[in-house]
Amino acid sequence: MYRILIVEDDSTIAETVRRHLAKWGNEVECVTDFAGVLEHFVRFSPQLVLVDIGLPFYNGYYWCDQIRKLSQVPIIFLSSASDNMNIVMAMNMGGDDFISKPFDLEVLQAKVQAVLRRAYAFQNSKVSVMECGGAVLNLSDMSLTYSGRRLELSRNEFRILQLLYEHAGQPVRRESIMKRLWDDECFVDDNTLTVNMNRLRRTLRELGLEDFIRTKKGVGYQLGGRQDG
């Protein structure tokens, strides 16, 4: 049903919650590298995050703030620090709900379902971000983030990158890109794509992404890999 990421350093609690949510048909993963929570988030692209406040390295507030820079995915805080100050802080940091420990698994399930229903009842949002080479493409707001910097993309820049991300490491034919941009490439001058690609490459260089898009002679373009010629 949904992809759920659990950020909880108590392995017993994390595994208990994982098993319970998985019983309902969800795909659930638990973070084990608490210095690399954001990397796990980008790789898994969850539709809900459950996060404890007290964590190794950085607390749950920090990771909520980092996730919010990339995505509006629902976040539920789980914590025994359930005083009013922490609850208010969690909501102000972008949390969608707060569940106090210890909690009943059925209550947790009901709150999870309620948050998911509110977030996805009127939209089909299966993937919110895509990542390649440390550059994160946000599908919800057409932005690209790299090394802590964020740029908003034009419609064509976003569509080109989305297609290349979908085939990361593989060449994409110019015809396929033109079809994504203009639906029927038969009536579009081939030079128009070249102009759009050059503009996108300039945008990428602003983020420090030199040669992020490679030309494959006689084929098209791809992210990464060796450039021909």
Image (cartoon, helix red, strand yellow):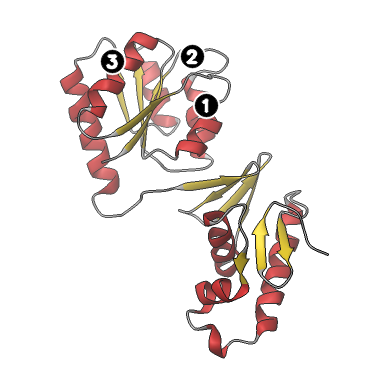
Disc 2 marks a residue whose amino acid type is: Leu
Residue where numbered disc 3 is placed: 16
Q: Residue at x 70, y 82 (%)?
A: 191
- Quadrant containing the N terminus in the rendered view: top left
- Quadrant containing the C terminus in the rendered view: bottom right
Q: Give residue 37's mark.
A: 1
User: In front here: 26 or 135?
Assistant: 26
Residue 142 at x, y percent in the picture: 53, 57
Side of 140 where 204 appears, left or right? right
In the rendered image of this protein, does residue 84 appear above or below residue 38? Answer: above
Q: Are there few (<14), some (14-19), or many (20+) residues within 10 Å of tag 3?
A: few
Disc 3 marks a residue whose amino acid type is: Thr
Side of 158 where 190 appears, left or right? right
Of the residues under marks 2 and 1, which one precedes in the sequence?
A: 1
**Eye-nearest disc, 2 or 1:** 1
Residue 218 at x, y percent in the picture: 71, 73
Q: Residue at x 39, y 27 (%)?
A: 29
Residue where numbered disc 2 is placed: 55
Q: Do tag 2 and tag 1 residues touch (Cβ < 8 Å)?
A: yes
Cα gap from disc 2 to disc 3, whole angstroms: 18 Å
